[in-house]
Every structure is written in C-alpha cells, then in structure tokens.
Image: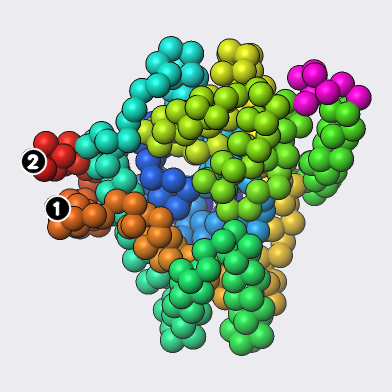
Amino acid sequence: MSIHGEASVTEAHPAGALEVLAAATRLGLTSFGGPVAHLGYFRQEYVERRRWIDEQTYVDLVALCQFLPGPASSQVGIAIGVLRAGLLGGLAAWVGFTLPSALALVVFALGIRGLDLSGAGWLHGLKVAAVAVVAQAVWGMARTLCPDRERATIAVLAAVVLTAWSTAGTQVLVIVVAGFIGWRLLRESTSLAVPDVRSPVGRRLGAMALVVFFALLVCLPVGRYLAPRSWIAVFDSFYRAGALVFGGGHVVLPLLQAEVVPPGWVSNEQFLAGYGAAQAVPGPLFTFAAYLGAVMNGWAGAALALGAIFLPAFLLVVGALPFWDVLRTGVSFQAALRGINAAVVGLLLSALYHPVWTSAIHAPADFALALASFGLLSFWRTPPWLVVAFAAAGGSAIAALR
C-alpha cells in the first residue's frame, strides 16, 4: 500500500505488518524527547523518508489524535500502521514503538534500581536533539499548513495562548476554537483534492471498538469494587489513566502516582526512581506503566499494566478512523481542518519553547549543539538516529568541559 501525492490506497495486507514493525522498532529505539519530538520523528520517517502518507494526511491524523484522550504520538503511530497494513499493522506499529523502552524500564525495575541519570551529559544531549527535531517539524509543517496570512495568524495566536496557559484543557480548547474559525472563515467553494486514504477498518468494527472503550470505562470500576484485591483493580487503574488523560506524556504521571502510591503498590521512592529512568529511554512515556507493573509483580505485572494503559488508545484509533476518512473529505470539515492544522503548528511552536527548549538549552554550548543538530537534519538529511547519537556525544563532551 502506498500513499503519495494523489495515489490511491490499495487494500491493506498482513505482509505489510512486518514492514511496519521494522519501521516502528527503529523509531522506538531512537525517538527521544517526548510526544512532541515523536511527531517530528514520525514525520521524518513516515512522510519524508518512506512516503507512506503525505503531509496533509499526516497532519490530519495529528489533529484527530489531539482530540482523543491518551498518548497522542502513539495513537498517530497506530493510525499510520492501521492505514498501512490493517489492524495487524496498527498492532505492529504499537509493539515496535513501545517495546524497546518498556523492556528497558522493566530491566531497570528488576535489576538496577536507584541509578541516578539526572546529571548524565549524554542524557542532556538527547534533550538537545529533541530541540532540533521539533524545530524542523515546526519549520516544515508551517510552510505547508500556514501558507497564507490567516492561517499564520491562527498559528501564532495558538502559540501565544498555549505558551501563556500550557494545560491539556487549553490545548483542546485552542484546537476546538481554531476548528470553528476555520469552519467560518477558511471555506472554499469546492472541496480540496485529498489523497484517497480508505481505512481498512469498517464502520461496524469502529463502532464496536468505541462501545468496548466505554463499556470497560464503566464496568472495570464495578469489577474493582467487587474484587478490590484482584488484578482487575490494577487493570482498572491503568486503563483509566490511559483513557482519561488529555495531553499524554508527562500529564499522565500525577494520575499514575495517585493510583499506585496511596494503595501501597509502589513506594514514592520507587516511583521517582522509575520516572528518572523513563527520561533516559526512547519511545512513549506511557511505557512508565511497564516499570510500575514490574515493581508490583515482575514481568506479568509489567505486561498487565502496559496493556491496560495503551488499550484505550488502540480502541479509540480503531473507532475513529472509519469516520475520520469520511469527514475529512467534506467541504465544511476541510475548512475546520485548515484552522485545526494551523493550531497544531502553533501547539508545536509553543512546545518547542516549553518544555523542549527550556529543559535543554541552558548555555551557549547547548544552543550551538542544537543548531548543529538542526543543520544535520534539515540540510544534510542525516538520519534522525545518527543525529541523536551525535547530540548524545556532544552532550557528553559539553558536560566533560564544564
């Protein structure tokens, strides 16, 4: 299946799942920097390098996943996997992107507790690499999605609002308002030609996925009440964390702490040690759940917690994709998407400043390393994993010279 320019999408086939798994595993091993940086890595791999989807479809997917609760970057990856190779492709995309960091955190939980990575120079270099990745994503997406004064204004205003009030609720509100502005002011007389992206998931299956999502949200607390000391209680805690958090990434941490520390499943010291380790691994921060599960009950606990926290993301993506493809081809929805896509650029621009820039750029040497990394990505077309290695080495060198 290929999506490029105006090429149509053929039927998804299971053999493509191996291709998706290989690409996603590569990203899972090299995607440092949090959910915003992950979107930059995804764009580099899936849009620019492999050309599985075009820029417009990619940003439409990002906008869709911003509306959904859960880990937005993982949901974008799952959606691309589904479009590429059906449900097996979505599962492969999730496994490849998630497993490397999950395994690393389980190993840490079982064998190397207490390791302090907060002062590691190479870890700081990885944060600097995230600056370059996000900056390149903002630059590339702004040229495509904000070609006129109106959309550029929406992007700038969105960045201003999100920088002043950076909460998950504000993000959702900004996207909704931008969609309304686009619907009212960015209409065109005819529908734009968009690539033919037919979801391999039918509407009936999509509706069933949404029913399962809400049914679990309602039934799991009941099961937990009836059997408070069973695995159902653990599954419920992690499922709700994945189902009810908007913004993903670091936003889920206080929710998880409230679920696992007060009952005594994990001590506060163990929780903080795992959080420190989670900063040093690539992939989604939601894999922190694997660490917590491993602390509670070894490998079985890790598998239960990891599956529970990501299950809502999978159900929501499968449920939304069949209806998303129909909506995005309508004139009114396309107008709304113009505003939403501009707001997504503003969201990335705001995130480039905080937390990406503020957590990484503390001295002129950091800025120089970020500029060099950006140049390698944008002008020399260096593979992202090489840029990550370069930035890690540069961070270690900077730390040694201080």
Residue 174 visible in this rendered orientation of the protein: yes
Please give the label number shown on residue 365: 1
Magenta stretch holds residue 138: no
Q: Is residue 89 above or below residue 139?
A: above
Q: Are marks 2 and 1 in contact (CB under 8 Å)?
A: yes
Q: Residue 253: horizontal and vertical position, in percent?
A: 56, 41
Q: Secondary structure at mark 2?
A: helix
Q: Residue 77: horizontal and vertical position, in percent?
A: 53, 43
Q: Secondary structure at mark 1?
A: helix
Quadrant assignment, res 11: top right
Q: Is residue 128 above or below residue 276?
A: below
Q: Amino acid at mark 1?
A: Ala
Magenta stretch holds residue 232: yes
Q: Residue at x 39, y 40 (%)?
A: 31
Disc 2 versus disc 1: nearer the observer: 2
Q: Residue at x 57, y 25 (%)?
A: 267
Quadrant position of the N terminus in the picture: top right
Report which residue position mark 2 lands on: 401
